[in-house]
Structure formats: C-alpha cells, structure tokens
Image (cartoon, grey):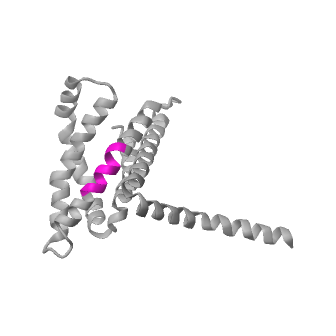
Amino acid sequence: MAPAASRLRVESELGSLPKRALAQYLLLLKLYPVLTKAVSSGILSALGNLLAQTIEKRKKDSQNLEVSGLLRYLVYGLFVTGPLSHYLYLFMEYSVPPEVPWASVKRLLLDRLFFAPTFLLLFFFVMNLLEGKNVSVFVAKMRSGFWPALQMNWRMWTPLQFININYVPLQFRVLFANMAALFWYAYLASLGK
C-alpha cells in the first residue's frame, strides 16, 4: 500500500509542476517585468533558432549545430526583442486605449505599418552586427531581402498580432509573440529560407 501512495504523491507533485512554474513566472513578471520578458525572449528566440537548425539539419543530412546562431538569437531576444516589445506594447496600449473607436483596427495598423517594418529593419541590422559583417553586406541584404521579408511578415503575422494586441492581456503579449516566433522560425526553415 505504501508504494501506491508514494506513486500517487509523486504523480500529483509532477502535475503541480506546471502550476508552480506558471506561478513563479507570474511573480517574476510582476516584480521584474522587463527583465522577465527579456530573458524569456532570449530563451525562446534561441529555441526557435535551434528548432530551425534541427529542421534544416534533417533536410541536409547534417550533424552540425551552429552555436553562434543560437547565441545571436539569444542576444537579440534578450537585449532587443524582449525589452523593446515590452515598451512597444505599453505604448500601443496607452496611445490607443481599448475604448477609442476602431481601437482594434488602429492598433493593428500601427503595429503592421510602423512597428513591423522598423522591427524587421532592426533585426537585419543587429544580426548583421552580431555576424560581424560590414555595412555593404547589410545594404545588399536590405535591397534583396527586406521587401520580401516584410510582405511575408504582413501575411503571416497580421492575424497573430490582431489577436495579440486586442485579446491577449498586456503582460502576456511579449510571451505570445515569442511563442508564435518559435513556430515562425520552424516554418521558415521548412521552406528552406
């Protein structure tokens, strides 16, 4: 009888692990909102890159993992995506409050027409710096890749951002976008991008 009771206790403790993790995350989010979002952005960005590399490795029958890619995405998420997204969502929430007529459409237009191109430009720029490439490489990448990347961003992210900025609670918007980005990287890798 004791082994069965012990097994039940272990099973119930394992079931409470996600609840405890969520409670800890919510506490950290309340105490250190920017830092918590920065760390979770860094981790999820690196995981997204790992997922993309894993998919690419299977397609190419390769065993090499590019650690520098993981580190670039970790740094980008930690120092750019997390903090910047935190403040952009706050700005959007207070500049276009929910009670404003057509708030959901205005927020979406603000995000898609201003924030998306700016964020994409910043992504190309920071990744270029982290890769140690010069300005001419950045300019060439912008000329060849910015417009197609922005169009794909508008197609894929517009419905997700509509949900995120209008229905996800403010404190979870960065996390929601990072979770979607995890799958976005996998999708891009599956297309061979």
User: Is residue 81 covered in magenta?
Assistant: yes
Task: Give the quadrant of the C terminus.
Answer: top left
Q: Position of residue 180 (x, y in %)?
A: 37, 55
Q: Position of residue 54 (x, y in %)?
A: 48, 39
Q: Which residue is drawn at 21% across and 40% down?
A: 121
The one of 166 and 57 positioned closer to us in this rendering: 166
Residue 94, located in which quarter of the rendered image?
bottom left
Q: Give the farthest residue toward the right.
A: 1
State the count of labels: 0
Q: In this view, does 50 lie above or below 61?
A: below
The one of 174 and 29 positioned closer to us in this rendering: 29
Q: Decide if residue 180 is in sight here.
A: yes
Q: Decide if residue 149 is in sight here.
A: no
Q: Which residue is drawn at 19% across and 55% down?
A: 112
Task: Give the quadrant of the N terminus.
Answer: bottom right
User: Is residue 30 covered in magenta?
Assistant: no
| Majority secondary structure in the magenta region | helix
The one of 51 and 191 positioned closer to us in this rendering: 51
Q: In this view, does 114 lie above or below 162?
A: above
Q: Where is residue 13 in the image (x, y as percent from the top left)?
A: 67, 66
Residue span colored magenta: 79-88
Q: Which residue is drawn at 17% across and 67% down?
A: 96
